[in-house]
Amino acid sequence: MIISKLKGSNKRSGMCKLRFEGDMDIYAAEETLAALLPYFDDFKTFSIELDKVGEIDSSGIQLLLQCHRHSEQSGGQLSITSCSDNVRELLDLYQLGGRFDLSVAA
């Protein structure tokens, strides 16, 4: 899993724009969480692009929920600005689209 911080991220405002690329599954969960932890220290609001995510399983969903929980506890929010068909399918299956503001995701 590759996590890239995108242009428009701003520590002063607390907004972080991230792009996830690769698989969000049990095999990448530990590595992905380790890559995300530094962002939790510096940002409270996250805008995440998931359109480059291939496979996703419940471990990937747990990572998204952890990001969402961190954002809420910090007074921020989390939105998904784009997602792959696989991500959308699993979020729909778990009925989590509303939690991640998928209304803007294509």
Image: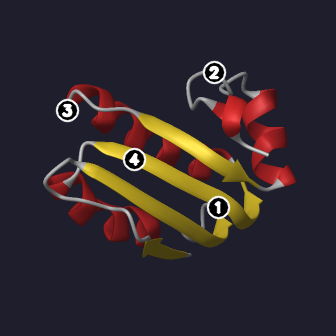
Viewer-nearest of discs 2 and 1: 2
Residue 29 visible: no
The residue at 37%/32% (across/down) is 77
SS assignment at label 3 = loop
Which amino acid type is marked by label 2? Gly
**Badge 2 local density, few (<14 within 10 Å), some, or many (20+)?**
few
Q: Give the residue at mark 2.
A: 98
Q: Is mark 2 on a helix, strand or loop?
A: loop
Q: How far apart are marks 4 and 3 (CA)?
A: 11 Å
**Relative height, residue 33 to residue 74 (above, below):** below
Disc 3/disc 2 C-alpha distance (Å) = 19 Å
Amino acid type for the residue under numbered disc 1? Asp
Q: Residue at x 44, y 70 (%)?
A: 6
Total numbered labels placed on residues in the image: 4
Residue designated by label 4:
46
Q: Earlier in the sequence, mark 4 or mark 1?
A: 1
Residue 98 against residue 86 in the figure, above or below: above
